[in-house]
Image: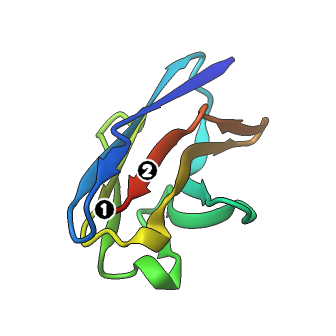
Amino acid sequence: QVRLVESGGGLVDPGESLRLSCKASGRILPINARAWYRQGPGKERELVAGLVSNGATRYLDSVKGRFSISRDKPGTEIFLQMNSLQPEDTAVYYCNFKTSYGDYWGQGTQVTVSS
């Protein structure tokens, strides 16, 4: 069983930055892709940034140029660098690891952007 734990959320002013982390533990299966999702108030969960095994990345249009997904060398920890945060980025952010045996999710970390 894989366990994912996020950290790094918080309350920031518009224009500020945050860096989210997601650490995997347990029986680490071959991981096909890693991603960050978010779910804002009254909204559906959406893909924010994805990273596949060949290094290719994918971003939600509204975060392109502001957010960056990365991983550590072992691939058991991923990060989301979020710059120039805006109120519309307010959401619970979840990390996701996709394996051949299914998807694993973290518990979520709250990001609130407000002046």
Per the image, the residue denoted by label 1 is 82
First in sequence, mark 2 or 1: give its number: 1
Q: Tell me the mark number nearer the camera, choosing from 2 and 1.
A: 2
Q: Is residue 79 left or right of residue 90?
A: left
Vertical position of residue 70 compared to residue 20: above or below = below
Name the image quarter holding residue 4.
top right
Query: Can residue 63 be spotted in the picture?
Result: yes
Which numbered dot is residue 111?
2
Q: Nearer the viewer, residue 1 or 63?
A: 63
Please name the residue shown 59% across and 56% down the image.
37
- Of 78 and 52, which appears nearest the observer? 78
Q: Is residue 45 above or below residue 111?
A: below
Q: Quadrant of the N terminus?
A: top right
The answer to whether the residue labelled 2 contacts the one labelled 1, judged by CB atoms less than 8 Å apart, is: yes
Residue 90 in the image: above or below residue 63? above
Q: Which residue is painted at 22% across and 59% down in the image?
A: 17
Q: Is residue 29 left or right of residue 112?
A: right
**Crowd rating for badge 2 (residues with CA inside 10 Å; few <14, some 14–19, many 20+):** many
Q: Secondary structure at mark 2?
A: strand
Q: Residue at x 61, y 31 (%)?
A: 107
The x, y position of residue 58, in whole percent, is: 50, 74
